[in-house]
Image (tube, rainbow, N blue to C red):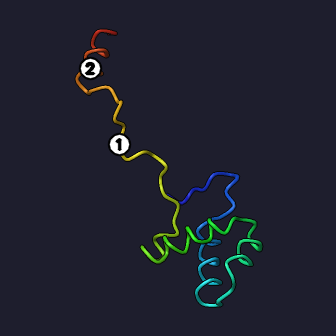
């Protein structure tokens, strides 16, 4: 998923620049954050994701939850749909 929302400060390209400046150019986290208008925490987040997954870790991920524990059981949904018809 490579479709950041309209107000996103970082894109995969910018994230790659962040990683490059931190790892290869040895710039300080504070300077990188200031340059891109993001927090130091965000810089650390993208560095951690890069270290964990490489370039793939810099791509945008889905914000959909992994589980929906309060979701109605499938059988109930099907029953309700039948009753509506």
> Residue 76: where, in percent of width, then height?
26, 20
The one nearer the camera, 51 or 40, is 40
The one nearer the camera, 82 or 46, is 46
Q: Residue at x 47, y 52 (%)?
A: 62
**Relative to 68, residue 32 above or below:** below
> What SS does tag 2 mark?
helix
Q: Residues within 10 Å of mark 1 (few under 14, many from 20)?
A: few
Q: Residues within 10 Å of mark 2 (few under 14, many from 20)?
A: few
Q: Residue at x 65, y 90 (%)?
A: 25
Q: Left of 39 or right of it: where is 56?
A: left
Q: Residue at x 34, y 9 (%)?
A: 84
> What SS does tag 1 mark?
loop
> Residue 68: where, in percent of width, then height?
36, 37
For marks 2 and 1, give the CA distance: 18 Å
Front tag of 2 and 1 = 1
Q: Which residue is mark 2?
A: 76
Q: Which residue is mark 1?
A: 67
Q: Residue at x 35, y 42 (%)?
A: 67
The quarter holding residue 80 reads top left
Q: Name the quadrant of the C terminus.
A: top left
Count of picture labels: 2
> Residue 71: where, in percent of width, then height?
35, 30
The one nearer the camera, 39 or 4, is 39
Q: Which mark is residue 54?
A: none
């Amino acid at each position: 998923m490579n479709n950041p929302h309209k107000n996103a400060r970082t894109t995969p390209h910018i994230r790659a620049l962040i990683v490059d400046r931190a790892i290869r150019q040895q710039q300080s986290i504070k300077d990188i954050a200031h340059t891109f208008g993001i927090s130091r925490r965000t810089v650390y987040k993208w560095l951690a994701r890069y270290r964990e997954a490489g370039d793939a870790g810099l791509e945008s991920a889905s914000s959909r939850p992994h589980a929906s524990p309060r979701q109605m059981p499938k059988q109930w949904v099907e029953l309700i749909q039948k009753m509506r018809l």
